[in-house]
Amino acid sequence: MSGYNTSALKELEKYVVSGDFDAENIKEDEVILAVLSTDDIKQKDTPGWYKDGKRLMDYKTGDKITIKYRADFDTDNIQYEKLEDKGEYIYKTYKIAAVVSFEYMYDCNRTDVYPHLITSGQNIQKIVPDGCYQCIYIDADKNMENREQKEFEKELISIGAGNAEVSTRSLISNIKQNEMFYHKQMVYIYGIAIIVFILVLINMANNLRYRMYSRTREICMLRAVGMSVLMAREIFLMENVILGIVSVITARFLSYPVLRYLYKISDMEVFGHKFSYNYTAFITISAATIALCIILSVNIIKAWKTRQITSAMVKAD
């Protein structure tokens, strides 16, 4: 069982799977539960912090969980490790306010057997007045230069070296490496998207030209019975716009589950990037696609303005 300060509890809100809690006012009989899970997507049996995985313990929001601890906190003996000590124990029952997929303040001594119970630091102090810090996160300035980062890391290492029970670790290089890997993947994704978009434009132009050529005889016959060039152009343009709109709507419903699946298998959540569907970009691209469809259609059907009906019908045959 650990006690978090207010800032750590607010960061923990990002990982809530079910339930809710007030980071500034957690009740004494409430706890936040962090339980390891297995990865159902990639079929990994090794437990870890997977948001959509299967929990090792089937605790739910609103369940009650009872813990016990020695009244004198004397746990540094063999009898206690073997569960054979005769000390006095205190029992407390807590209500699970929320379940989280990650404990945020990483516990190096965690096991796969017990869940991690989290409450506020004030509530822990009421149980253990002389408690100590287990883990402290220190955020450096994002605009810090490399020289300043190295000096900062050396200072933290010197603090850890002065106490055998304190260990320090810098995550700056790990964060940079993860961000570099993320940006590299995004470059590949955008590059592939641009190439696919160019191929789609080429295919769209060819398809529109083929549709116009395949319907030349039909249009010429309609013109022969009195249809004007303007009316023929309007029919062809309207058909192409409707096809473009239907394609955009179909792409919307097909792209969301595909992107959701790709997000789950890409481990982007590990790097702290949440899934989001960029509706603004989708609407912009859709509008550009329909506009290009209109422009291509107008340019292609310009030939009908000067084409002779008889020669066009003979050519179509």
Image (cartoon, rainbow, N blue to C red):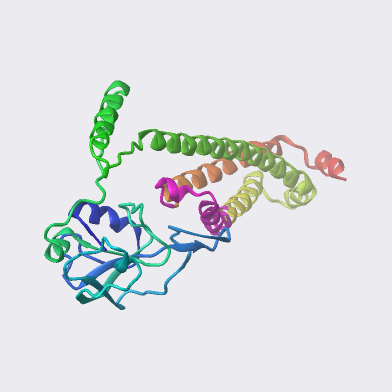
Magenta segment includes 264: yes
User: In the shown orientation, is residue 214 left or right of residue 261?
Assistant: right
Magenta segment includes 316: no
Q: State the residue at coordinates (28%, 33%).
A: 157
Instruction: Pinpoint residue 277: horizontal percent, then vertical percent.
Output: 45, 52
Q: Is residue 30 above or below residue 204?
A: below
Query: Who is closer to the viewer here, 1 or 176?
Result: 1
Magenta span: 248-276
Instruction: Pinpoint residue 1: horizontal percent, then vertical percent.
Output: 26, 63
Query: Who is closer to the viewer here, 140 or 122?
Result: 122
Q: Is residue 130 above or below residue 135?
A: below
Q: State the residue at coordinates (50%, 44%).
A: 285
Give the image quarter of residue 90. Answer: bottom left
User: In the shown orientation, is residue 174 left or right of residue 294?
Assistant: left
Query: Who is closer to the viewer here, 275 or 155?
Result: 155
In which quadrant will I find the C terminus? top right
Residue 49, visible in the rendered structure: yes
Instruction: Pinpoint residue 161: horizontal percent, then vertical percent.
Output: 27, 34
Q: State the residue at coordinates (26%, 37%).
A: 160
Query: Who is closer to the viewer here, 307 or 278?
Result: 278
Give the image quarter of residue 31. Answer: bottom left
Q: How many marks?
A: 0
User: In the shown orientation, is residue 250 left or right of residue 170?
Assistant: right
SS majority, magenta = helix
Instruction: Pinpoint residue 238: horizontal percent, then vertical percent.
Output: 60, 52
